[in-house]
Amino acid sequence: MGSYFGLAHLDCGQSRDVFAEVTAAAQCGPHDVIALWHDLDHLAGVLRLLAFLDLPTRSAR
């Protein structure tokens, strides 16, 4: 299995937390302060998860 957040496995709790952070960042109001690099890192985590889920399985080879 590939690496996700520097780990050798996927943890559902981590994925849920990443999605929650991205959702919270998307719902910020115009006067809320966001930590851009922190939020972009979570968005990159969602993209890494989607890329991992899109990998072909061993049985498909």
Image (cartoon, rainbow, N blue to C red):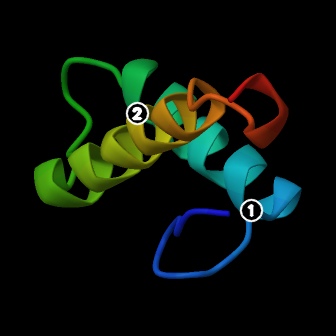
Tell me if 29 is positioned left or right of 34 in this view. Answer: right
The residue lying furthest to the front in this view is 61
Nearest the viewer among 57 and 39 is: 57
Task: Kindly identify the amino acid type of the residue bearing the numbered disc 1.
Answer: Leu
- Please, is residue 15 above or below residue 49 in the view? below
Q: Position of residue 2 (x, y in %)?
A: 56, 63
Q: Position of residue 19 (x, y in %)?
A: 62, 37
Residue at 26% from the left image edge and 60% from the top image edge: 38
Residue at 76% from the left image edge and 46% from the top image edge: 16
Count neighbours of disc 2 (C-alpha within 10 A) and say few if under 14, some if 14 to 19, many if 20 or more.
few
Nearest the viewer among 1 and 49 is: 1
Q: Earlier in the sequence, mark 2 or mark 1?
A: 1
Tell me if 50 is positioned left or right of 56 in this view. Answer: left
Q: Which residue is mark 2?
A: 47
Count neighbours of disc 1 (C-alpha within 10 A) and say few if under 14, some if 14 to 19, many if 20 or more.
some
Quarter of the picture holding the N terminus? bottom right
Q: Position of residue 3 (x, y in %)?
A: 52, 69
- Please, is residue 28 above or below residue 21 in the view? above
Q: Secondary structure at mark 2?
A: helix
Task: Kindly identify the amino acid type of the residue bearing the numbered disc 2.
Answer: Leu
- The CA span between labels 2 and 1 is 14 Å
Tell me if 12 is positioned left or right of 5 in this view. Answer: right
The numbered disc on residue 10 is 1
Residue at 55% from the left image edge and 27% from the top image edge: 23
In the figure, residue 52 lies in which quadrant?
top right
Tell me if 15 is positioned left or right of 37 in this view. Answer: right
Q: Position of residue 54 (x, y in %)?
A: 57, 24
